[in-house]
Image (cartoon, helix red, strand yellow):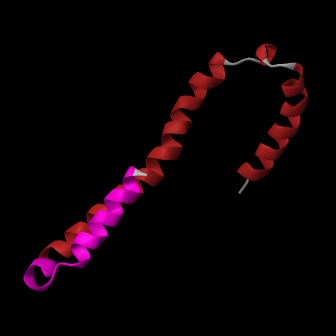
Amino acid sequence: MVYAIYCRAGVCAFANLKRVAGRLFAPLGYSYILAILVSLLVSQPLTLRCVLPCWAASFSDTQDPPLIKRIKPLYKSLLGLFSAF
């Protein structure tokens, strides 16, 4: 949400610059917005990948309720199917 607000404000601000100021600062603004979006795309999966070993060590199959134990193999097979893409 915060990224969207920054990007929208940056695009509006740099799109309204004219003449010399626009020629000087518009590329800087566009590169700033691009850097924010790329950092969002990199940070989300990277954070989850780094935290996954900690989560996996704290959970075990013995703590699962019976219904979850029955559903988990189906979920793992679906997850393996979609992770191939």
- Residue 74 placement (x, y as % from top left): 88, 39
Side of 61 where 6 appears, left or right:
left
Residue shown at 81% from the left, 38% from the top = 76
Residue shown at 59% from the left, 30% from the top = 52
- Say which quarter of the image contains residue 3: bottom left
Q: Main secondary structure of the magenta part?
A: helix
- Residue 37 placement (x, y as % from top left): 40, 58
Q: Is residue 61 above or below residue 37?
A: above
- Residue 7 placement (x, y as % from top left): 34, 62
Image quarter where the C terminus lies is bottom right
- Say which quarter of the image contains residue 32: bottom left
Q: Residue furthest top?
A: 62
- Closer to the camera in the image, 80 or 69: 69
Residue 11 painted magenta? yes
Side of 48 where 63 appears, left or right:
right
Q: Is residue 78 above or below residue 29?
A: above
Q: Is residue 41 above or below residue 21?
A: above
- Closer to the camera in the image, 1 or 74: 1
| Region rendered in magenta | 2-23
Q: Residue furthest bottom?
A: 19
- Say which quarter of the image contains residue 35: bottom left
- Closer to the camera in the image, 63 or 53: 63
Side of 21 where 27 appears, left or right:
right
